[in-house]
Amino acid sequence: MAPASRSPWLIPIVAAAVVVAGAIGWLLLPGAPPQTAQQSAANSQQTVAPSPASPTSPPDVRPPAATTVAPKPPPPATPAVQPASKPADPILQQIGAIVGSAPCSFIAADAAASGPIGLRGVSGLGETSELEIQATLQRAIQMALPAATVSWHMRRVDGPYCPVLDALRSVGDGAGRSAVALSLPAERSRLADGDAVRVSVNISSAPARLTLDLFASDGTVHHLHSGPADASHTYPAAAWKAGEPHGDQLITALVTSNAVFTRNRPEREPAAAYLRDLEAALAPVRGHDDRLAAGVLAIDVVAR
């Protein structure tokens, strides 16, 4: 067993699992049934009966009561649809609170009310730290969901990518899953010098604004696209060519309702300065933008 001092991040992960496990009981508490409808009806009839000169007021009082009750059936129809798409939400929220505390990682969860939980994503941790994180997350998930089966599909990257992964993880969508799916043609993950970079982007919250960036191991970021986006689209451009520095690179997607920056950024700039400005731009909208989401794709660039 590893000493506690080696893993200061274990405490928030386990604490998140305990908090979210307690949230399940709260979600199941029944609401109190209404009790005052018949009493108010009886009172209204008693005030109308002794007054023969006002026969017109009861018809005026009852139609509103009928009209207030008539709209009530449609609203239950809306909640009736919600449970069909919402059963997985509590599960994903619990998992999101747990995996969201993993440092230097971007993890998305695929889960349902029943069935295995698939965790996939990108990690900038070393092999030992990553295995330790996985073991800790798996224990935390099983504390919250004892019957859960967890499968891992993580891609480890080498480079100065922890600030990138931490910034995008803080965006999330509150459910531990990514609302943005990124892929290269034929599900490739390796490009050679001079290959065109064609990124397929699938957005669940479209239409929205999309910001596509390419982070390289030399500490720079290349802005690939910034503008409106539809639900599913491939973003090719002759200028997007794979090249040095060779090795792991990250393609990131940020989805927002409005433009992130009020002015154009340079085509290429230091990643540290960009991430600092990005954090400042996202701070006011985090928690207030329903479309706010992120995605990460790791690629390997090699010499031709």
Image (cartoon, rainbow, N blue to C red):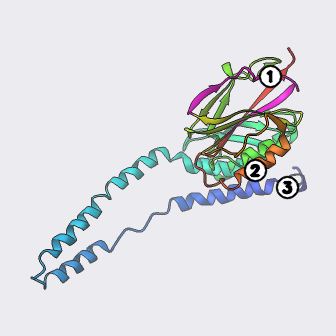
Write down the residue under mark 1. 242
Q: Amino acid at mark 1?
A: Ala
Question: Residue 75's image quarter?
Answer: bottom left
Residue 279 marker: 2
What amino acid does circle 2 point to?
Glu
Q: Secondary structure at mark 1?
A: loop
Q: In the rendered structure, find residue 8 and report the number of the disc placed on it.
A: 3
> In this orientation, which residue lies closer to the viewer: 157 or 271?
271
Q: Position of residue 254 (x, y in %)?
A: 68, 40
State whether residue 60 is above or below residue 70. Answer: below
Query: Where is residue 128, by image quadrant?
Result: top right
Alpha carbon distance from label 1 to label 2: 27 Å
Q: Is 191 situated above or below 80? A: above
Q: Tell me which corner region of the image, top left, top right, bottom left or bottom right, holds residue 294.
A: top right
Q: Which residues are magenta?
A: 230-254
Three-letter residue code for mark 3: Pro
* Contact flag, marks 3 and 1 (Cβ < 8 Å): no
Q: How many marks?
A: 3
Magenta-colored stretch includes residue 210: no
Q: Is residue 267 visible?
A: yes
Q: Relative to 190, say whether 45 is above or below.
A: below
